[in-house]
Image (cartoon, rainbow, N blue to C red):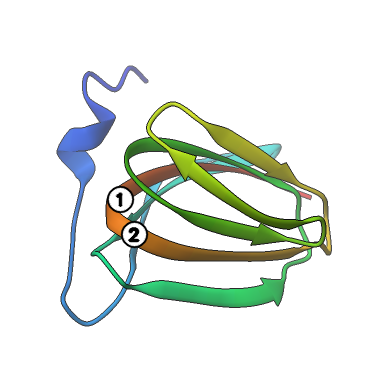
Amino acid sequence: MPIDDVLSLRKFSAEGPVKTDVLRSEKFNVVLVCLETNHEIPPHPEPYAVFFLVLEGEGVFTSSEGSFHLRRGSGIFIERDGIRGIKCLDRMSVLGVQDGH
């Protein structure tokens, strides 16, 4: 299933972050998370590992290891049950690859 342009799936809302499923499988899920400037996903644990890749914009990603300023082209891996949060500094699109277990 080729995807010509992941950014064509972007959806933003003044109400808060928007998560769009790109691909769901037995082994992993891929989501696109879009945040307007100053939107935040507060730090919280999740029962799956995830790799976040910033496609555009920039923000501060929080994990159990601290807070990290990431921008286009940078990413972060967070272990299963690890704390994760995102604070958008500049309108941002993030690809998340989640462990399906």
2 and 1 marks in contact (CB < 8 Å)? yes
Is residue 99 at least partly visible in the picture? no
Q: Nearer the viewer, residue 24 or 97?
A: 97
Label 1: how many residues lie within 10 Å, few (<14), some (14-19) or many (20+)? many
Q: Secondary structure at mark 1?
A: strand
* Residue occupying the far bottom of the picture: 15
Q: Which residue is mark 2?
A: 89
Q: Answer left or right for 73 relative to 69.
A: left
Residue mark closest to the camera, 2 vs 1: 2
Place residue 14 in its image quadrant. bottom left
Q: Given the image, on which type of amino acid does mark 1 rest?
A: Met
Q: In the rendered picture of this protein, how many numbered marks are placed on residues?
A: 2
In percent of width and height, residue 4 lies at 22, 18
Residue 23 in the image: state x and y as whole percent.
45, 39
Q: Nearer the viewer, residue 30 or 57?
A: 57
Q: Please name the residue that numbered disc 1 is placed on.
A: 92
Assign a secondary structure to mark 2.
strand
Q: Is residue 8 above or below residue 85?
A: above
Measuring 27% from the left and 54% from the top, which residue is drawn there? 90
Locate residue 3 relative to residue 94 in the image: left or right.
Answer: left
Q: Quadrant of residue 55?
A: top left
Q: Measured along the vertical axis of the image, is residue 25 above or below residue 68?
A: above
Rendered position, 63 above or below 96:
below
For the point 64% across and 40% down, the residue is 76
Three-letter code, disc 2: Leu
Q: Position of residue 65 (x, y in %)?
A: 81, 55
Query: At 18% from the left edge and 56% from the top edge, which residue is drawn?
Result: 11
